[in-house]
Image (tube, rainbow, N blue to C red):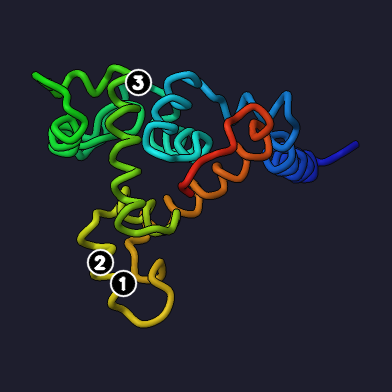
Amino acid sequence: MISAIKAVGIFLAVSSLLVIYLPELPGVGRLFYPLLYKDVIVAQAKAYNLDPLFVAAVIRQESGFRPHARSAVGAVGLMQLMPDTGRWASTKVGMKGFQVDQLEDPATNIRLGCWYLGYLFGQFKEPDKVLMAYNGGEGNVSSWQGQAGEQLAYAYPETQTYVGATMRAYQRYKALYQDEMPTRVTHP
């Protein structure tokens, strides 16, 4: 008879393997890495020269594809835009009469979030720096750039984790969906 401790150990080992390897399988991986709002993501990513799979990775990391998500600091929607960022981005894309509750609309949120990612790519050029700015703020990235050594090492711990998790998600999205996506993008 197997002891309870051994049974728990076996369960944990098998569970760990499943968590690591199941998302790699295309049929199962798509459950862990969904591509909801695909048409909107593709259209807006194209409008701002972004890889739609990079956008999907940001959405997955930010909100888990929940359009009504709200963070403790007040970020809203799929791409977790702060209300002030949403207002600012809405003026840049020519939206009239923007209201913060529009950030819960997937099409609006993705449009403004893609514009903002495109803006950040214009400033920081590299995906990891763009993600650092998206999560930790543009001003912080600029100050971290002045530090010696690897810039990410100076980022907030939350930002370091965010960048790593989002880039891993991006790699998974590419492995699962790349054959279905447009290939001409500027960023990343």
Q: Are marks 2 and 1 in contact (CB under 8 Å)?
A: yes
Q: Are marks 3 and 2 in contact (CB under 8 Å)?
A: no
Q: Are marks 3 and 1 in contact (CB under 8 Å)?
A: no
As helix, strand or loop, the secondary structure at mark 3 comes to loop
Residue under label 2, please give it: 142
Q: Name the residue rendered at 40%, 66% in the picture.
A: 152
- Dot 3 amino acid type: Pro
Residue under label 1, please give it: 145
For residue 102, say whether it is visible. Answer: yes
- Dot 1 amino acid type: Gln
Q: Position of residue 22 (x, y in %)?
A: 72, 34
As helix, strand or loop, the secondary structure at mark 1 comes to helix
Is the residue marked by circle 3 packed among few (<14), some (14-19), or many (20+) residues within 10 Å? many
Marks 3/1: CA–CA distance: 33 Å
**Depth order, front residue of 125/16:** 125
| Camera-nearest label, 3 or 1 | 1
Residue 136 sits in which quadrant? bottom left
Relative to 10, is 43 above or below? above
Q: Earlier in the sequence, mark 3 or mark 1?
A: 3
Q: Position of residue 162 (x, y in %)?
A: 42, 50
